[in-house]
Amino acid sequence: MSEASLYFIQQLVNGLTIGSTYALIAIGYTMVYGIIGMINFAHGEIYMIGAYTALIAITGLATLGVSWLPLILIVALVCAVIVSSAMGWAVERAAYRPVRGRHRLIPLISAIGMSIFLQNYVHLAQGSRNIGFPLMIQGGFDFGGDDTFRGSISYMQMTIFVTTLICMTALSLFISRSRIGRACRAVSQDLGMANLLGIDTNRIIAATFVIGAALAAVAGLLLGMYYGSIDPLFGFIAGLKAFTAAVLGGIGSIPGAMLGGLILGVSESMTSGYISGAYKDVVSFGLLILILLFKPTGLLGKPEVEKI
Amino acid sequence: MIANNLKHALFCAVITLVISYPILGFNLVARGVDITLTGADATTLVMVALAALIVFGFQLFRDRIVGTITDITRPGFGTHKEPMEENRRARIESWVLTGILVLALFWPFFVSRGSVDLATLVLIYIMLALGLNVVVGLAGLLDLGYVAFYAVGAYTFALLSEYLGVSFWMALPIGALLAALFGLLLGFPVLRLRGDYLAIVTLGFGEIIRILLNNMTNLTGGPNGIGGIPEPTLFGMEFGRRVKEEGNTSFHETFGIAYSSEHKVIFLYLIALVLAVITALVIRRLMRMPVGRAWEALREDEIAAKSLGLSRTAVKLSAFTIGAFFAGFAGTVFASKQGFISPESFVFLESAIILAIVVLGGMGSQMGVILAAIAVTILPELAREFSEYRMLIFGAAMVLMMVWRPQGLMPMRRIHIELKKQE
Amino acid sequence: MRTPVKKLVTAIGTSIAVMGAGQAAAEIEIGIAGPMTGPVAQYGDMQFSGARMAIEQINADGGVMGEKLVGVEYDDVCDPKQAVTVANNMVNDGVRFVVGHLCSSSTQPASDIYEDEGILMVTPASTSPAITERGYELVFRTIGLDSMQGPVAGNYLASLNPERVAVIHDKQQYGEGIATAVRDTLKDKGVEIAMFEGITAGSKDFSSLVSKLKQADVDYVYYGGYHPELGLILRQARQAELDAIFMGPEGVGNKDINTIAGEAAEGLLVTLPPAFDQKEANQELVEAFEAKGEDPSGPFVLTSYTAVQLIAEGIEKAESTDPFEVAEALRNGTFETPIGTVEYNEAGDMKSFEFVVYEWHSDGSKTPVN
């Protein structure tokens, strides 16, 4: 293969890695939107809190002298998922449930307030500096010729791929097979009707927040390890990107979130790779605006009928 | 019932512990080159435990507490007070407003320079908040990139003065009109979008403008910003110690008074005051005109408004453009006050603060927004020890306001005409 | 510490200045402006600690021309808006000498006001060349310029005979300024610049950038910016097996980069001002700081100390507290300070400010090269 195409493949791999984590975060937006039609602005912060919890757990285990990698990863994952899910539940309970059903702007402003609050909560508790994540999964394998450009796929990148795939498959099965999943679909079709049929809609809505938050925590741990540092503000921008991904794929659709995440990740890495890293955010926001203008329902979304 | 409550209360208390203990109870600290974990001090732990207890107690007696609160608030609200006669109220209000205005006009001559400067900043925020109030409060369009229009106004003045030597008075209308044009151009395509999409698109737009300002180094100086922006002149008289521009005279020489650094600051304050008053009056007028009614109609019920023959795009666009216009106004004054601007003054946080002002003051209410702008700008100055907590408090206040009092501290009063009772 | 009530009184606007001019006859006020709160408060602490120490020591030695120095501290949060408010407050309080501000974007708008109002300013931390480019009479600094640091790094890189060099920056005032200077120096020396581009500050994913560097086949990478981004770039470059040597300015030279980059920080080249606290002549001063429980090794502690000292010596030399005369004295004099011998040029920059190239190690220590 020529050097140019090897380079292209490398950038594609980079983009797909980032894209799959965007997809994991995007699920949280898409499920909540699908069910109660609001943007959970604080979702990016929940992801950030997941990353912080994971790092706290990892550092704590290291202090205790635990060095067996799988144990560390599992404990960190479990801690992050528990704290993030609890956070997701609490946020829904405190900031969204009381304002549900009011004018559209009100839950949205409440969500923005929550996002600012959580950012500063972690900022005040943990300081504003960037904190390094220990390097845990190292190495990878190379591809391409010996003479010029050698691409490489790290084990970390593969871990991210595989974990994302597992999570997505599990989620799809859960939504299509389980009782709660069926109830979720029913609620997203028609909340009032589902209520009449005896589904505890409050519980289902809380469940979607918890599921979204748990996936965000997984993404938090993975991305923390992959990038190498976290700070209280990084959830916000990642959340925006993930939301873009959700809209791109068609908000409310779970395969759409996956597709949107991948497209966004690839277009970002191509911008950095072929134009300049300084314009990467311009491209992703520009893409969002274009999609919304020409296909507001996204790539896989269903057209929405205005209800009276 | 109690057993049920107890279970729920316990669950809530545990959740409180789970979300607060790991983050507050452990601190990641860099020791040399290693990250270590230290336990928080006893006060923090006590606070965490206390928070869990409070949540437990509240949830356990939730019904009773909520019941008591509603009992307290329900009577006494509007029942004891006879509503004041509309005319009398309007008369009192206009007297009070005139009084405040006169006070605002003469106040700067008796106070310190720093206070006047802070007051100018407050007035800039008032202009911004009044402008955003049209978009968010009246028309119900959530604009999270409002700061972009503010930046357009500021940069228009900075660039015009840098390259063409245009003065403040020329740049003021140009900056405002250009910001309005940006509003129009952005608004045209995006206003078809539903509320929440609109919020995200405007947020993206705000970021794009900032990144472009930062990246177009040749034109805007990029991150270095633009300096040496002139101050406003009074009929060609400059307020500096030395005259900078050819052909201008200086204020203190013309009037034969001693140079005082206060003149300049007070003059800028007065300009900002006049512009803020103009902003308030224009918007007040617009609110009573058909277009203002149309904004509110559309906010309340889009479909009903459409079926009454209102053009959705035209109405929204007018709100968006007018909001942008006043942001441009404020931007020009800001550039002139600072003398130096760079993209870091136009970040998303600024949009969030302006939005917080509108929300806290009461969406749609002009008096409320003005009071909130004053409070939000001055309180952190007064309580510097708490300035770290400023954004935390803003965030919490936004949520609490939406939950308990979405109409704001000083809700908008509907303008209405009552039919006189037949004698 | 002023009480909130007192602040309320000032803010609401009694015309009685808190630090009124009436009592100024017996003492000389020095305004110290920098961030006490906000994201860069840690750097502000260095500045305040250095200035306080200088004021203390000068007063213990009998003050300046028989008068005591009084430090008046102001918080600008490194926000240009608040810096202007602070500057106006200083005018109001009758301060005529200022040590500050810290961030260049705050120093620049504030210095407009100082120059207009006849206040002498010495910044111990702002490195942007734009600050002293405007021909102001009353603006000085006790730190080098970005445009001085760049050539040092560029010359050093050129001396290594690199084949291809990439120059990256974070699109911020500081980073882009230095990176541009490095690029220009390298170009003059005939070194091939493979890449010159910006990244997004605050971003975390640099995998695309690293692949790009790999494809460009560079042997040296210069990064203009701060440690959070470079730390990540180093780490991600190590993961992707990019074997180039990195170099950065003093903004990357602190131990935080090790917590992010880990092993990958080994061999990083950094230009830093010489460690003033290691100097033989400063040991007494270092002990004084340590006796107070403060750390004198921060980059702005001794520059801030020097700023106060220069103002004091300038006043003595001019035998006047008129800022214009003091400025004149500073321009014409030679001063022995903890940061070395200081001489000023017309613009208000030091005629020489040394930068040294260090090699950084993964345990956070550094060794001077050559």
Image (cartoon, rainbow, N blue to C red):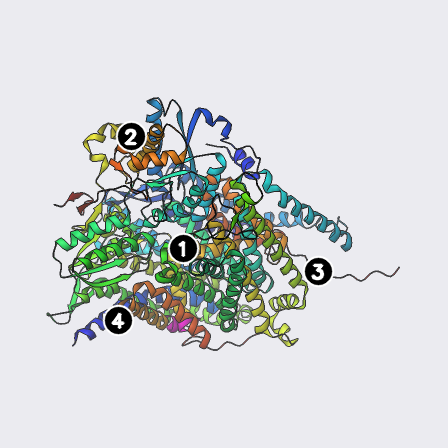
Residue that mark 2 sits on? C289
Spatial separation of the CA atoms under disc 2 and disc 4: 54 Å
Spatial separation of the CA atoms under disc 3 and disc 2: 66 Å
Marks 3/4 in contact by CB < 8 Å: the verdict is: no
Chain where mark 3 sits: B
**Label 2 vs label 1, nearer the camera:** 1
Residue occupying image coordinates x 44% and y 24%: C26
Badge 3 marks a residue whose secondary structure is loop
Residue that mark 4 sits on? A12
> Which disc is residue B415 wearing?
3
Are marks 1 and 3 in one subunit?
Answer: yes
Q: Is residue A248 magenta?
A: yes
**Label 3 vs label 2, nearer the camera:** 2
Task: Name which residue type carries label 2.
Answer: Phe
Marks 1/3 in contact by CB < 8 Å: the verdict is: no
Percent x, y of residue C119: 42, 38
Badge 1 marks a residue whose secondary structure is loop
Segment colored magenta: A247-257
Percent x, y of residue C330: 32, 35
Are marks 3 and 4 in one subunit?
Answer: no
